[in-house]
Amino acid sequence: MKSSMYAKRIVVMLTLLSLVVLAACGGDDEGAEESDPSDSEGEGTETSEGDGDMLVVGLDDDPPLLDPHLSTAQVESQIFLSVYETVVTVDENLDIQPGLAEDWEVSDDGTTYTFYLQEDVTFHDGTEFNAEALEYNFERILDEELGSPASSDLALIDTMTVEGEHTLVVELEEPFAPFLAGLTHRAGQVVSPEAAEDEEVDLSNHPVGTGPYQFEEAVAQSHISFEAYEDYWGEAPGVDQLEYRTFTNEDTRITNLTSGELDIVNRVAYKDIEQLEEDPEIEMSYEDGIGFQGMMLNTNRAPFDNQEVRQAMNYAVDREAIAEVVFHGGVNPSVSPFAPSSWANNPDLEVPERDAERAQELLESSAVDDLSFTLSIRPSPAEQQLGEMLQSMLNEVGFEVELEQVEFGTMLDNMYEEDYDVARLGWSGRVDPDGNIYSWFHTGETYNFTGSNNEELDELLVEARTSTDQGEREEMYHEAAEILWDDAPYIFLYHENDYKPMKENVQGFNHVPDGLIRTSELYFE
Amino acid sequence: MAQVEETHLPKEKIENPRVRMWKMMFGRLFQNKLAVFGGVVTFGLIFTAIFAAWLAPHDPTEQNYSAVLQGPSLEYWFGTDNLGRDLFSRVIYGAQVSLQAGLISVGIALAIGVPIGLISGYYRGFLDEYIIMRLTDAMLSIPALVLALALAAVLGAGLTNAMIAIGLVLTPNFIRLIRGEVLAHREKEYVEAGKASGISDFKLIIKHILPNTMAPIMVQATLAIAAAIIVEASLSYLGLGTQPPDPSWGSMLANGQGYLDSAPWIALFPGFFIFLTVISINLFGDGIRDMLDPKMK
């Protein structure tokens, strides 16, 4: 099915091309000029009348898993915020705000958290949300059988006590600074206990939460639709119908936005930013991102089991050129997991200029003969462009790089099985710096696909997450970033900035640096 | 027997009938202006492909980050792409990929299709009727590009695999064509005569039937080259053909798709060359068909 669609697309493409050639030869532009304004007028009326009650969000990938406790992909988080709610939330300054917990207290020693929950909250299946439901959710995430990637956020929970209908007391084994920050994300997302226990519901494909929207249907590689939840406890969403549509190709995605199919898009190619900013029908919101991007090296495989080979990679890449050529200056070159805006960022760790000689020296001294490997990239034009740049830079110093395009879902599968050489995979980032480093680089943690194990780093990371003194933590993260640069299990390349283009009639957008679209706040003018 | 030959006539004055036939046929070809155009362009492209290394002013894979997305200029005739590579050089090297894909995949199709077609048509019977023909029917029922996509996906991305996939897709056409020709020829007197005089089947097929089926095979092969070039471009466009950084017209087209507004030349030039090549080969192929058609005057 998919292939025939592709085939059609090619035919259309070739036809269009020959038309372009013919039109260029013909030189009669009048017809084209006439048709343009009438076209856009027609679409304008359609948007305000036909789609007025439906908010359509364009996504860059098909969300593979709709269970927040099993999810690892950022694109899924886009959807979770519509259907699920978190214990606490985060605002545009990354400060913690009330969510399903209207208030909370933290004991002075930093080990006891008391959550006072909202009353009159119900799940979409009609069951009630209370302290027991929250306890169930925490237990579900911690259940080893489920294997939730979010469990690291809750791993230090010692005991939980339900004190009355709407109060939950959580005791931690030791202080854990990122605890509340973790609850703004997947670990804090609350699913209906009844739906989770009922295998027929199949939570992975049929989410049941307390959020402003309830799930309607999901069609793979096409759309996921929601409708406003009538009994929602908070303010009703601005638009009744909500639909997410997947366009993996960034050009198609943007075309669908400018043509009026989509109202807002979660991700945009940097090359299109300038053009979109000039478009009078498009509003562009901009915010510093909190994630990191780069190349993941499989340190269990040759040649990346050799530290010097990994370090050579660090010097072989030209981060400035990448930022300029692929991202049109829209990203910040980087060598650390922390974004420049983060308090954990180490200002002394400067991005070095490309040093091909140094890279070659390191490769020579490593005495590794076979420097061939496969670089896995996702099938998008920008990824392809970045991939070809990396290939050219690395080949120049002596590597032999083969590029391989892999769908995102497959790439994640390969990561978990550690069946890859090098993968172009990054992280959307977390509110607390711990979320950008611990599960990625601590030995044996969820996203440690590099297989790296560095005892010094492990100790430091554990210390940093249990300390409640931000000044102390800051220093520890500075040191951790230096260790990562030296050990080089991951080649940090750049920090993304988050751009969200939307139709000008879309209002109420609140740009939180986590890059997630809070759909219920949006309304049409 | 020897005396009967026209030994008394001066040999040089009489044109060899074979030469006369060729002259007539080429005369027919040269009268067809479109075919001449097709032929000239085709041979020009072959020349370009062979001498790509001398003709290309730049290394087709060299990235120049200070000259990204530049329009056509004296330095870069066709402009540069999103990695600052010279599109003129890439188009020239792309001709190599395209013609290689066309020739090799048709070669594969011929290598498999001709023997099977000959055997199938000559011996007929169960194998022909129920196995080979039904298999070709099955393959022909699937659109060529879809089948090539499926095969290339199974074999894995890459130019070599793409050529194998395209070759396999083209094969049933040749089997059918040759089988049909052989069916017509096997009833003819010269075959009967050959059989009567005790020539082995193998010799009869190779030495007598095959040469008589050459004309339609040649025409079909020429047209198949054009089809193969399109399919290779399509597979590369979808990322299953030529792998980066090697230039293929198809992948260049895909690369340019995102820049149709800002840098249309990236897609325009490879697109135009695919168009030009395919139409030239088709025109040339049509010309050859007319040239070889004995009914044409």
Image (cartoon, rainbow, N blue to C red):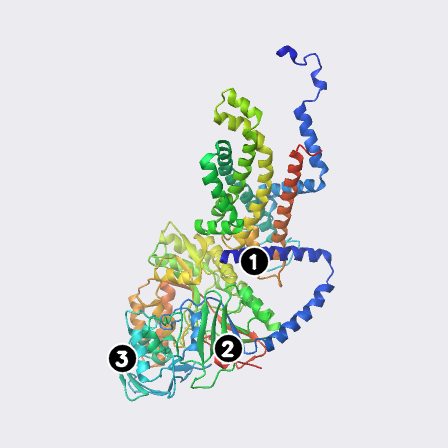
Callout 2 secondary element: strand
In the visual, does A441 lie left or right of B123?
A: left
- Please name which of the two marks, 1 or 3, marks the residue nearer to the observer: 1
Circle 3 residue: A174
Q: Callout 2: residue from which chain?
A: A
- Please name which of the two marks, 3 or 2, marks the residue nearer to the observer: 2
Q: Work out whether mark 2 precedes mark 1 in sequence or the reverse, and give the earlier one.
A: 1
Q: Work out whether mark 3 precedes mark 2 in sequence or the reverse, and give the earlier one.
A: 3
Quadrant containing the C terminus of chain B is: top right
Front-lying residue, A55 or A158: A55
Circle 1 residue: A9
Q: Residue B258, percent across and down? A: 57, 62
Q: Residue A476, percent across and down? A: 34, 74
Circle 2 residue: A241
- Give above or below for B297 relative to B149: above
Residues packed near mark 3 inside 10 Å, few (<14), some (14 to 19) or many (20 plus)? some
Q: Are marks 1 and 3 on the same chain?
A: yes
Residue at x-position 30% and y-position 87%: A108
Q: Give the spatial CA distance, label 1 vs label 3.
A: 57 Å
Asked whether disc 2 touches disc 1, contact meaning CB atoms under 8 Å apart, the reply is: no
Residues packed near mark 2 inside 10 Å, few (<14), some (14 to 19) or many (20 plus)? many
Residue flagged by tag 3: what amino acid is it? Answer: Glu
Quadrant containing the N terminus of chain B is: top right
Callout 3 secondary element: loop
Q: Give the spatial CA distance, label 3 vs label 2.
A: 44 Å
Residue at x-position 47% and y-position 43%: B135
